[in-house]
Image (spheres, rainbow, N blue to C red):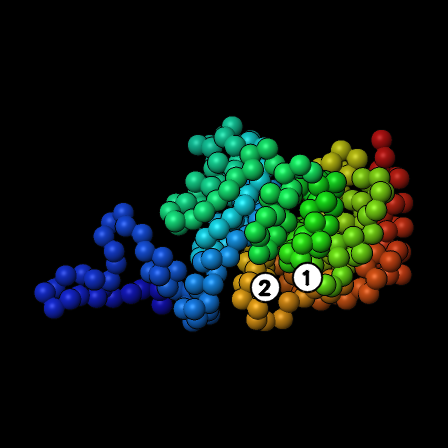
């Protein structure tokens, strides 16, 4: 499986591949056919996806979607690669230290598909450029840093206003938690209930809302590694890769209009360490009594951990 015998013309010439250095879209993504039709592959080719954040999940989201054959992207990140990124960020290597993340990732994506269109936002996204970032976009995929509360709130709000489907898949432990926000359905704000709350409250509500099942919690062996006050937490590349596979699958379903798309208040969490999949349904989002209890417990834990 995975081995293709060379094809030859009548004169014996190998016709199974283009000449070295040439790129052919149909052949590059031909192995997608079967799970998508040739017509659907062309639909994906012409879709435009915006990804904010080029770190642990954002970078691998981009490359996974590029290998799916999507050919138009908006990507945003203000940061440069550092050695602390090596455990989880697909663009972080010795050769890319100190380089802007958007430049490295755009280069990697064009290495997959030289025809790809990528509009980069090297200063990240903010209130001023957010409309341009989402202009003409068919899907928004969240790759922002966990603690980027203000711009995340604005981005999902504008997606809802513009009718743009938006998905977030969070890397938690050695697993991933998915929530989609679809046009005309429950919005990010309705689900997470952030409002004008302080950042610490938003952090607690974000974790509770993303993963109501909490599958990752029992195997956190160094609890002090999670510190919302210092805006830090542990991560694994396994989780980022799982996130990218889930996000790309959701992208395929949303962009092609087929398959069951779980939308808030429904979600799921898969944890590879515990071999467990949990499907969740929380009417009212963080207004749900179960969430309110979890938020209250989270606040108590944060109060104890406060410096």
| In front of the other: 27 or 115 | 115
Q: Residues within 10 Å of mark 1 (few under 14, many from 20)?
A: many
Q: Residue at x 9, y 65 (%)?
A: 11
Q: Residues within 10 Å of mark 2 (few under 14, many from 20)?
A: many
Q: Residue at x 54, y 66 (%)?
A: 256
Which element carries disc 1, helix, strand or loop? loop
User: Residue 158, percent across and down?
Assistant: 70, 49
- List the residue tagged with mark 2: 254
Assess whether mark 1 and mark 2 are in contact (beta carbons under 8 angstroms): yes
From where the camera sits, is residue 89 visible? no
Residue 182 is tagged as 1
User: Residue 95, percent across and down?
Assistant: 44, 32
Which element carries disc 2, helix, strand or loop? helix
Q: Residue at x 48, y 60 (%)?
A: 44
From where the camera sits, is residue 98 visible? yes
Residue 176 position by quadrant? bottom right
- State which quarter of the image contains the N terminus: bottom left
């Amino acid at each position: 499986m995975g081995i293709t015998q060379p094809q030859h013309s009548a004169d014996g010439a190998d016709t199974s591949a283009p000449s070295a250095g040439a790129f052919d879209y149909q052949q590059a993504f031909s192995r997608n056919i079967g799970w998508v039709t040739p017509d659907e592959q062309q639909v994906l080719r012409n879709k435009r996806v915006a990804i904010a954040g080029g770190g642990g999940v954002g970078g691998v989201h981009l490359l996974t979607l590029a290998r799916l054959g999507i050919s138009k992207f908006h990507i945003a990140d203000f940061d440069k690669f550092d050695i602390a990124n090596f455990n989880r960020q697909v663009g972080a290597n010795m050769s890319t230290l100190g380089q802007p993340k958007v430049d490295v990732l755009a280069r990697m994506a064009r290495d997959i598909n030289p025809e790809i269109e990528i509009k980069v936002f090297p200063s990240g996204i903010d209130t001023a450029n957010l409309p341009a970032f989402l202009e003409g976009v068919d899907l928004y995929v969240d790759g922002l840093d966990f603690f980027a509360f203000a711009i995340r709130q604005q981005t999902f709000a504008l997606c809802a206003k513009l009718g743009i489907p938006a998905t977030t898949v969070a890397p938690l432990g050695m697993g991933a938690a998915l929530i989609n926000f679809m046009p005309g359905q429950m919005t990010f704000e309705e689900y997470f209930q952030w409002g004008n709350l302080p950042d610490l409250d938003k952090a607690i509500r974000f974790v509770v809302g993303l993963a109501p099942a909490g599958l990752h919690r029992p195997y956190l062996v160094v609890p002090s590694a999670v510190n919302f006050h210092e805006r830090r937490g542990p991560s694994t590349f396994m989780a980022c890769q799982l996130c990218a596979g889930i996000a790309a699958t959701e992208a395929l379903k949303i962009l092609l209009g087929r398959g069951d798309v779980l939308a808030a208040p429904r979600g799921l969490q898969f944890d590879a360490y515990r071999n467990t999949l949990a499907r969740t349904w929380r009417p009212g989002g963080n207004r749900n009594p179960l969430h309110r209890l979890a938020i209250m417990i989270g606040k108590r834990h944060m109060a104890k951990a406060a410096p």
